[in-house]
Image (cartoon, rainbow, N blue to C red):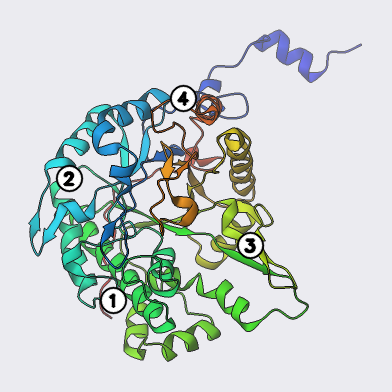
Amino acid sequence: MADGFLDIIHRVRGEGDDAGDEFGGGSGQDGGGLPTGEVGDSFMFATGIECSYPTIDHGRVRRDQLAECGHYEHWRGDFALVHELGVRVLRYGLPLHKVWLGRSRYDWSFADEAMAELKRLGITPILDLMHFGVPDWLGSFQNPELPVLFRDYCAAVADRYPWVRYYTPVNEAYVTARNSAKLGFWNEQLKSDAAFVTAIKHLAACSILGCHAIAERRHDAVIVHSESAEYIHEMHATVSEHTVLANKVKFMSLDLLYAHPLDAEVLLHALDNGLTREEYAWFMRGDPPGYQVLGIDYYGRNEHIIKPDGSKFEAEDVMGWRAIACQYWQRYRKPVMHTETNVFNADAGPSWLWKQWVNVLSVREEGVPVLGFTWYSLTDQIDWDSQLSEKNDTVNACGLYDLARKPHPVAAEFRALLEEFGRITLMPHAEMLHTTNQAARLKVDR
């Protein structure tokens, strides 16, 4: 019997791998191994330091999670844990209320030490500049001066740390506006549609002007906007107008940021509650500068089902991150990143981690560019079961480590995930692509 082609290949080339396989391809590098720290061409595995700082009790109490969770005391050890775990990207927020003391007045003492240590360890920060609160001297998100003043702060940070490339100017603008101005939990503690629209337009403007300030100083800046993935499933044959609006208004902050026309119901709602035609035209001029990445935060508690009797309960994974990420991708066509997830039960952490990772892999297989995945946060948090609205000192066991800096089971699972997938590319077959240092173009008036 004559030799087949495979017999000939084996006779001529042998049984081993051919030279060149080590450079990629079907039998080359499969993406296994801990992250190298070369951020830019590789998928970004991240954790974060919980850094929220809204006020409650009408401004009398500042909920500083960096203090409540012990980071001011343990920051060197926290960064060491990140490094030891094998994570090389960290969502990190400077304490805005402590750094920004007034117009052109800053206290960089803590920030300088922390940032220098991150740089020494080779950890890439995604620098979070506004996380649910503002300094007392600025008042609240109702202040119309906030966007132009915040631009100055972003410029000051970019000048101070020119080596930083990745930024989140405003964390979860929709949640910030909702909890501060619609639900009355935080900061201005208002409960009106007009206050909500005012807050969300100011926050969107903060993001846009912040992008300008950063991109002027760091031309290759990567802007990772993070927003909470929310959805309400109403179990009525005819869904109420309130639920229809709620499921659309969640896009408002990103629509204004990315110059995506508001849905008709949302536009009418916004115009009725203080958004002017001139302001809307300004938002619709075009994308902000910088390489824009859409961060999508997903917790099972973000989805809710409303039963016919009106009662409401959490509905984790009805849609899940996969379906929601695809929805956001179709709307904005921006590369996405899974920027936050956790579960409040330490024993359930490992299964939740792997479920979220399956979601990420599934979305990548659909051709959506997913650039990173984040377990948020490094340590347990305080009072997030009440969204920080009450000072109960309840520990939420959602971290990779507890507040004594002892690992939860999910820490070992995250390490195992990193060892298996830590060197995958930004998206499948992305070896042909390269994140360049070419200057981003600034948006200009037409």
Kind of residue indicated by mark 3: His
Quarter location, residue 244: bottom right
The residue located at (66%, 81%) in the rendering is 240
Kind of residue indicated by mark 4: Leu
Quarter location, residue 68: top left
Q: Earlier in the sequence, mark 4 or mark 2?
A: 4
The image shows residue 356 at horizontal and vertical percentages of 59, 43
Q: Earlier in the sequence, mark 2 or mark 3?
A: 2
- Give the mark toward the camera: 2 or 1: 1
Lateral position of residue 294 relative to residue 53, left or right: right
The answer to whether residue 88 is seen in the rendering is yes
The span from disc 3 to disc 4 (Cα, nearest Å) is 36 Å
Which residue is nearer to you in this view: 280 or 405? 405
Q: Residues within 10 Å of mark 4 (few under 14, many from 20)?
A: many
Q: Earlier in the sequence, mark 2 or mark 1?
A: 1
Q: From the image, tell me which residue sits under label 4.
A: 34
Secondary element at image label 1 = loop
Q: From the image, tell me which residue sits under label 2.
A: 161
Kind of residue indicated by mark 1: Gln
The residue located at (52%, 50%) in the rendering is 369
Q: Is residue 182 above or below residue 150?
A: below
The image shows residue 430 at horizontal and vertical percentages of 50, 41
The span from disc 1 to disc 4 (Cα, nearest Å) is 45 Å
The residue located at (43%, 70%) in the rendering is 178
Kind of residue indicated by mark 2: Tyr
- Give the mark toward the camera: 2 or 3: 3
The span from disc 2 to disc 1 (Cα, nearest Å) is 29 Å
**Disc ID at residue 142:** 1
Q: From the image, tell me which residue sits under label 3.
A: 304
